Amino acid sequence: MNRFNVSIIVPIFNEGDQVSDLTQRLTLLNDYVTDIIIVDGGSTDGCNEKLAKNFTVINSEKGRAKQMNAGAQQAQGTWLVFLHADTHFNSSLLRAMIDQATLHQWGRFNVQLNARGLSYRVIEWFINTRSRLTNVATGDQCIFVRKRFFESLNGFKDISLMEDVDFSKRARIHAPPKCLTEVVKTSARRWQKYGVIKTVLLMWQLRLYFWLGKSPEVLAKKYH
């Protein structure tokens, strides 16, 4: 079994509903990576304690950027993979990343939402196509990056929202991403909870406001 020089970093906050599934998925990756670092932002539902039985859990101030940066500082791998708790990542995707990104500094996967229906397929197509055309990745697409390159960019900017978009825009100046066509599956729970049309319109609005220079803190309040 090949062990890759990769660190997987998972920011969490009150992920109690996903602990069992997340533990199972990450356990299958244990023998393939250098380390798996879970960064807790102050959970109160006990998910951090449950995950600490099987993995390295460190504490950080709440905020995805803060948490991912804290995990990157602890990481021992040459490559960093930033994984959302509700995104499925496996050893086959890991191999694809290593095989295809050899000459690249960073990249992402295509994304698929774990829900049936034409509307979700359309959303996926727009996310993946927009990402390929703009060289901008979102966290759901499982961003991966060489640790030295990540450090040279001072990691994720400490903002409340759009840290992934901001990082992509800074990274693409120096190196284009490797846009892998392999698929990571992620939760469609936000679209299902608030409605597809409403959620899509909100996302477009947030991106427009961010492009126009609106404060990420203001956008985060609108998002949450």
Image (cartoon, grey):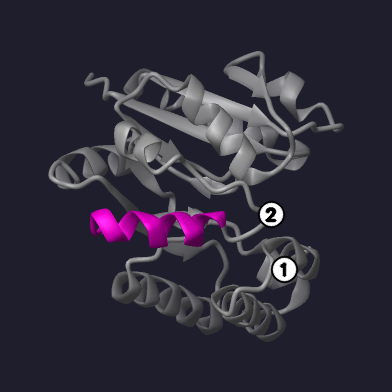
Pick the quarter of the image with the C terminus.
Answer: bottom right
Q: CA distance from mark 1 to mark 2?
A: 8 Å
The reply to whether the C-beta atoms of the residues labelled 1 and 2 are less than 8 Å apart is yes
Residue pictured at 48% horizontal, 29% vertical: 72
Give the main secondary structure, helix, strand or loop, of the magenta stretch. Answer: helix
Residue pictured at 54% horizontal, 28% vertical: 71
Q: Would residue 65 be found to the left or right of residue 80 on screen?
A: right
The residue at which mark 2 appears reads as: 160
Q: For the residue labelled by badge 2, is the local secondary structure a helix, a strand or a loop?
A: loop
Is 168 included in the stretch rendered in magenta?
Answer: yes
On residue 68, which mark appears? none
Range shown magenta: 163-176
Q: Is residue 160 above or below residue 19?
A: below
Q: Would residue 194 be found to the left or right of residue 97 on screen?
A: right
Q: Is residue 172 above or below residue 87?
A: below
Q: Amino acid at mark 1?
A: Leu
Q: Amino acid at mark 2?
A: Ser
Report crowding for label 1: few under 14, some 14 to 19, many 20 or more residues within 10 A (C-alpha).
some
Residue closer to the observer: 61 or 143: 61
Report crowding for label 2: few under 14, some 14 to 19, many 20 or more residues within 10 A (C-alpha).
some
Residue closer to the observer: 7 or 68: 68
